[in-house]
Amino acid sequence: METPVESTRERLLNIAEQRFGEGGYEGTSLRAITVAAAANIAAVNYHFGSKEALLRAAVARAMAPVNTERRRRLDQLEEKGDPAVEELIRAFIEPGLDLVLRRGERGPVVARFIGRVAFDPSQRIRELYAAESDPVEARYLAALQAALPEAAPEAVAFGFVNMLGLLALHQSQALSRAPGGEPVGLGNGQGNGLGNEEEPGRLAENLIAFLVAAFDRGLRS
């Protein structure tokens, strides 16, 4: 049976994911989080110590399953030997979309939170996120550089950074909604081809195809 202490901690983390994802770190007050979580500042100090520590705990919780799945897939590819560019991109992108967009009703909230924090305007917040993601991302970058020996390492690194940015945009759902909140469309009844939280499989395939072309053709030419 869950204890009251565990319940308060989980509520704070859940609300922090939602509010930080919507308003960013600087735009979200600790009071707004505690009020929504039916808690108080003392509870935040008890469980986490500070607003930044609360954010760090939320990032660690959100990224843990993504990092685990990315490591597992990369281990398998490297055991097989000489993974292809498409295999590496797929192994990186799918966990970033599937494990957050399909994580029950909170999936879109977690996805938006990760996407927002990954490219927060504050360097300090980006560094905090990087502490959770860099070890796995460094392995993928090295693997992509090995899979593209004819491309300059710095060119592959440039492509990798842009892949991270595009993934974060889709996680934050910034590309699936117009400023007024309406779904983005082409005006031709065919949708926008971007996919959304209801179509993570379609979104993943479109994104992977785009990135494979960018790496395989753009960096080889």
Image: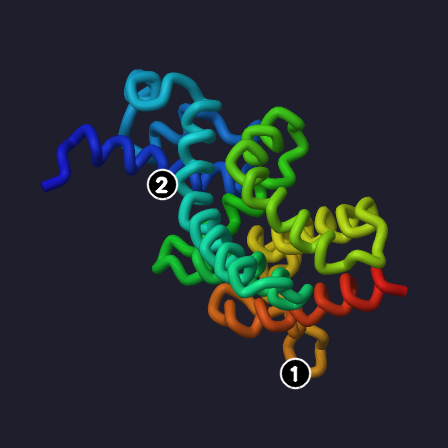
Outermost residue to the left: 1
| Foreground residue among 15 and 178 | 15
Mark 1: amino acid: Gly
- As displayed, is residue 19 above or below residue 219? above
Q: Secondary structure at mark 1?
A: loop
At a point 71% along the width and 82% down the height, the residue shown is 188
Q: Give the image location of residue 217, x and y in percent.
A: 82, 68
At a point 83% along the width and 60% down the height, the residue shown is 219
Is 122 left, or right, of 50 in this rendering? right
Could you tell me if residue 97 is visible in this image? Answer: no
Q: Give the image location of residue 81, x and y in percent.
A: 59, 63
In the rendered image, which residue does mark 1 sit on?
Answer: 189
Numbered marks: total: 2
In the rendered image, which residue does mark 2 sit on?
Answer: 14
- As displayed, is residue 127 above or below residue 202? above
At a point 57% along the width and 51% down the height, the residue shown is 172
Is 123 left, or right, of 51 in this rendering? right
Quarter holding residue 177: bottom right
Q: Give the image location of residue 105, x and y in percent.
A: 36, 58
